Structure formats: structure tokens, C-alpha cells
Amino acid sequence: MNIIKKALDSCELPNLLIFGYDLYTIRSNFLKILHEVYEINEPIILNHKKITYYKTNIYYEFNMSNINYDNFYEILLEIVTTKNYFGNISLKLIILYNFNNIKSNIQNSLRVFIEKYRKTSVFILLTSKYNSIQEPLKSRCLNIRLSLMNRKEKIKLVLNKERYELTPQYFDKLYSIHNDVITLKYSKLDSNNVIDFKNPEE
């Protein structure tokens, strides 16, 4: 977490490749850190050339699943060809969420964008499949792994619960959850709800 914060606060902000087990947790944790570093306006939803994406005064965010790449490159070119003189920072932050299983030709094209428009833009790739990223793309980014809560951290969440609620069954469920947001919700459940609880994998 501190590495990401230092990178975002750096005058030489690098391109970032952030990966981990759970994509939703990666995104929510990264945006939380981003809001700690910058004062960010509420995102607006734009729909241009049949592509929906988010825009704030600091970043643009694209969900890379089921995206039309021809239209995407047109939109991306419009963003990266101008410098951000009036924003909080001069660089455009472009978040590519769900960067999983992206084809090699698409990765090659993005590598060209990253190299060519380094003076105007910083790319932030969020993925749960690190091995699907090509080495040339990895080498142009600072690679950071965001880990999920470990067992010790999960136990701290439930120390305020009554002893009778902390059954082996409760902990089995708590340890089986691989999403920090759901872990937090589950840690607040009372023991009566434990039996019926299902995590997304189940």
C-alpha cells in the first residue's frame, strides 16, 4: 500500500501494473489509495463510440472486458495527445481495469501508447492474472502485488464479537473468503447468519 502511495505522490509517477487474487479488491483498494493522495471529484460516466468509461479530474477508467478496441484506441488517442494543464496534476492517469486475458496484439499496441505518450499520460493496469501480461509490458511498469487480508488481520476484525459466536464454523467461513470487501461484511454478521452464508465462489 505504501509503495503505491509513494509512487502516486512521486514527481516521476511511473506506469503501474497492480495485480492480486481478487480483481474487485484490487480496484477498491487502489481507488482508496488514489483518493488519499489526490482530491478527486465524483466520477462522471461517459458513453462515446459505444464505449462507457469513467472520468474525473484526475483519472479516466476503462473496463477492458468486452471492449471494442477500434473505438477504444480512438478515444485513448484523444485523451493522450493533450497535456492536462488545468487539472490537479499535469499527467493523465488512465486506469485499465480488468486487464485479464488481453490478446498479445492488443498488449503490443498498448505498449506503443505507453512509450509514445509517456510525457502526457500514465497507464495503470489492474489485473488478477499477472502471468497473462507480456514481459515487454511488465518491464514498462512498476509491478505491485496487492495481497488480501491474512488470517491475523481477519481475526482482528472479529475480536469484539461474543465468544459464543466465534465457532470453528465461523472461522472456516471467514478464512475461505477471498475478497476483502465481503470479508468485512461477513465479519459483522451474527452467528445466526453464518449457516446460510455463501461466498461468491460457492
Image: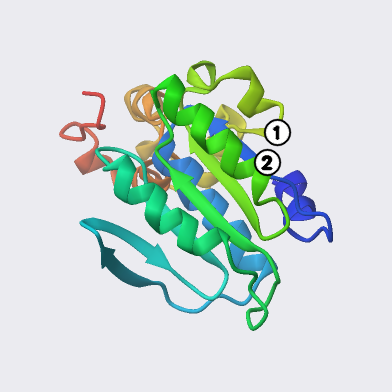
Front residue of 93 and 177: 93
Frontmost of labels 1 and 2 is: 2
Along the line of sight, the residue nearer the viewer: 96 or 5: 96
Q: Is residue 158 visible?
A: no
Residue 34 shows which numbered tag?
Answer: none
Tally of marks:
2
Q: Is residue 151 visible?
A: yes
Residue 99: quadrant of the picture: top left
Q: Position of residue 116 (x, y in %)?
A: 66, 46
- The residue depicted at 45 percent of the width and 54 percent of the height is 76
Percent x, y for residue 93?
Answer: 59, 59
Label whose residue precedes the other's in the sequence (1 or 2): 2
Q: Is residue 149 above or below residue 50?
A: above
| Residue found at the far left of this picture | 196
In the rendered view, does 135 fall on the left or right side of 78?
right
Mark 2 = which residue?
115
Q: Secondary structure at mark 1?
A: loop
Relative to 184, is 4 on the left or the right?
right
Q: Which residue is mark 1?
A: 140
Q: Are marks 1 and 2 in contact (CB under 8 Å)?
A: yes
Residue 137 at x, y percent in the picture = 62, 28
